[in-house]
Amino acid sequence: MKKLFGKTFGVFLASVLLIAALAACSPNEGNGAATNAGKENEPAQGSGTESLPKVTLNIVYPGDPQPDQDTVTAALEKKLAEDGINVKLKYQYIPWGDYYQKLPIMLATGNQVDIMWTDPGLLGTFGKSNSLASLDEPLSKYGSAIMDALDSKYWPPVTINGQKYGVPAGALGTTKGYYTATIRKDLREKYGLPEIKTMDDLLAYAEAVKKNNPEMIVFNEPPAQYQTGEVLQSTVSDGIVFNFKTLKAVAKYDLPGTLEDAKYLRMLYEKGYIDKDVMVGRDIRADFNSGKAAIGGGDVYEYNNYYRNISVPGAEVEFVKILLTDEPYMPTTTWNFQSIAATSKNIDRAVMFLNWIQENEDNYDMMTNGLKGTHFDIKDGKIVTPDGVDASTIGYAPPEWMWQNPKFLKPKATDAPDFMEQLLNFDKDTKLLSPIMGFNFDQTPVKTELAALSTIENKYKYGIAAGVLEPEKAIAQYSAELKKAGLDKVIEEYQKQVDAFLSAAKE
């Protein structure tokens, strides 16, 4: 069995409030990128509702509004005021399909935005346009709980030229180098097979499924493409990977390992383990949950979703995690950040609010789960539906992954019994971090070439990954067309920027 290798964030005085007992000055609220220098005699947080004048924080998130957001927001504002932060929270949700287009327009046209969700792509774009506030100084003054909550490994993705431009989420499960999937434990045991720990074990399971259930799809989606040998991180184009050892960007489809991987996938397809109609769009999760497929692709979060939603009587599921490399690695430690607009008039207060979330479990739970007794309860350390409450009518389930703190993260009663253990342990053995974590490629010099490469990618990438296309012929054609469209120019520009990034990191 060949070894396979798994596959990629001054001074402006806003007001002075005299307090009879303390006679203290309120902290300055930053205006633009020049935020918080030279302030003295700032009141301690928690000194009462009169500690700070009330300000409004405009928060922009992707997705759909929470039906019960107003109820939870009122409770959050009350508790924040009691703790001396005294803010009004104004949420605006933008549908995912519009977020990446509308948010830049909001910032460019002067719409008042304080806190916003960003990811590596948005952070890179906004960083180049100076649209985000540097948070180093406000974090040093008002972010102690944030800094305590987040390991140092989480900060490189939000750091540009040595400055922090976001508060990262404490993500879990970002390690690469594994093949991960969910299988039917009941079928494995029925066929007398051991726990799946290797790719050979997985193939034995696939063979048994196909032999005993010829009508079943084995993989609900093709296994992700692999690379063999050295650590190769995905980049701006399917045709380019970055080598951790050589620190060089190279043409992916010129690598011998890429052809080997394509042949492996072709073998799965020809054996019938990959559905012949794989290129036709369908609900792949429904295939597994309804019993039409025996292997559900995805990470530990997908495993938990399969556990919750599988509808086959007597079915049991288990998580498969197979190390395909000598050492697991992290291309990034987190994908999700909360950034603050450079034009915000309330930079300090925004950081105070984000810090407040992480100060204790009660704050975190209210932000994450809503009102105890109304939206959630805690039993045996797990989040449960309150007695007498219909779980389907609970109107508050916000995106915890934006502010996730592993120390406060709690399992839900509906989770798979081993989900939290799998999640907390997923990155445990990972020591190899990407040398270009936090690097954001400026596509401007090669945007024409990248557009051409993307068009060609759609012709070949998915057919190769699904085993549908004959490997030798398809890869040779794909590689030739990529080069004709300007692949080498993109690699050269990518390498130029990577070299500058690595050089700056040494200074």
Image (cartoon, rainbow, N blue to C red):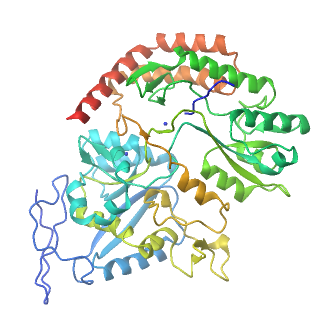
Q: Nearer the viewer, residue 217 or 426?
A: 426
Location of residue 150 in the rendering, given as x and y in whole percent from the top left corner: 37, 57
Q: Is residue 28 above or below residue 335?
A: below
Pick the quarter of the image with the C terminus. top left
Q: Quadrant of residue 85?
A: bottom left
Residue depicted at x 46% and y 24%: 451
Q: Is residue 55 above or below residue 180?
A: below
Q: Nearer the viewer, residue 353 or 226?
A: 226
Residue 167 sits above or below residue 373 on the image? above
Q: How many numbered marks are there?
A: 0
Is residue 283 shown to the viewer in this render?
no
Q: Is residue 281 left or right of residue 45?
A: right
- Position of 356 with respect to 93 (left or right) is left
Percent x, y of residue 80:
34, 77
- Inspect this view and state whether residue 325 appears: yes
Q: Position of residue 302 (x, y in %)?
A: 64, 50
**Image position of 211 with respect to 311: above or below:** above
Image point (48%, 10%), residue name:
484
Q: Quadrant of the N terminus?
A: top right
Could you tell me which residue is drawn at 37 percent across and 45 percent down?
9
Q: Position of residue 501 (x, y in %)?
A: 28, 31
Q: Left or right: 133 with respect to 416?
A: left
